[in-house]
Amino acid sequence: MAAEIKVDCTGQTCPVPLVETRKALRQAQTGDIIEVTGTHPSSKREIPMAVKAMGLELVSIEEADGTWKIRIRK
Amino acid sequence: MADKATIILHSGDLDKVYSAFIIGNGALAMGMEVSIFCTFWGLQRFKKGALDKGPLSKMNMLGLGRWMVKKKMKQANVAPLEKMLQDFKELGGKILACDMTMDVMGIKKEDLREDVISEYCSVGTYVSEARDSKITLFI
């Protein structure tokens, strides 16, 4: 059963959202979903770049009222 | 094998140490292997209790500029250097200490934070890592 891991980076700035995403991904098992929430604008673009570089699956990106949510499958 | 980034940290200035760790942590987060080679003033920051004690590279103004930048960084919620170092280590980054600097500056291993230093080495180790690196920087 795949787990769902939530990472809250609200209010955090460079490079914390990227680093916290990576920390969560390292601990996750293959198939797990990692959901990262944040407000730092560049990280919304850069977390997907990291996901692509590591060959993982970007499930979705949403944004509402300046808060984005990125879902990744390991 | 993962792509590699190799950074020489020659400066001990607060802002430049930040640059090294932000780039290093970013590269680790994006799946690269990262080594930071610490030499001269950069190695001074790895003495016990010295990590965030460097001056600003510009407009230090006897510490006033440094104080203002630290205050601004806190307001902007920038992570402290100590957290960046812990994240760097947690993501598998390596800190390498230049042994020639230790001789020149009279720094002993016990003066340094041996818990975070992976290796004591010199230029040959840097070159052999850098020649396989996609990114190499001198800060």
Image (cartoon, coloured by chain):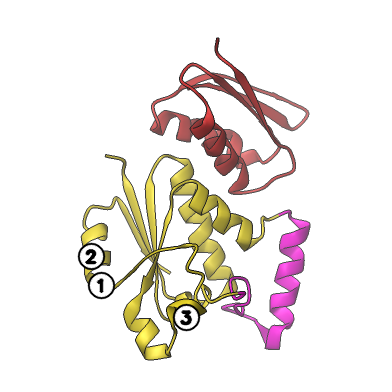
Give the residue furthest to the front: B110
Question: Where is mark 2, residue-wise?
Answer: B127
SS class, disc 3: helix
Q: In the rendered view, tell whether residue B128 sits above or below residue B108.
A: above
Indicate which disc residue B123 carries: 1
Indicate which disc residue A17 carries: none
**Residue B61 falls in which quadrant of the image?**
bottom right
Q: Residues within 10 Å of mark 1 (few under 14, many from 20)?
A: few
Frontmost residue, A46 versus B100: B100
Do dots 3 and 2 share one subunit?
yes
**Residue A9 falls in which quadrant of the image?**
top right
Residue at left offset 65%, top offset 82%: B60
Frontmost residue, B26 versus A1: A1
Q: In the rendered view, tell whether residue A24 sits above or below residue B28.
A: above
Question: Where is mark 3, residue-wise?
Answer: B41
Q: Earlier in the sequence, mark 3 or mark 2?
A: 3
What colour denotes chain B? yellow
Residue at left offset 53%, top offset 77%: B47
Circles 1 and 2, Cβ within 8 Å, touching? The answer is yes
Q: Which chain is red?
A: A
Q: Is residue B65 magenta?
A: yes
CA distance separating discs 3 and 2: 20 Å
Quadrant of the image for the C terminus of chain B? Answer: bottom left
Q: Which residues are magenta?
A: B49-77
| Residue B130, percent from left and from top | 26, 59
Circles 3 and 1, Cβ within 8 Å, touching? The answer is no
Q: Residues within 10 Å of mark 2 (few under 14, many from 20)?
A: few
Query: Amino acid under label 2?
Result: Val
Q: In the rendered view, tell whether residue B51 sits above or below residue B4.
A: below
Q: Is residue A21 magenta?
A: no
Do dots 3 and 1 share one subunit?
yes
| Residue A40, percent from left and from top | 67, 41
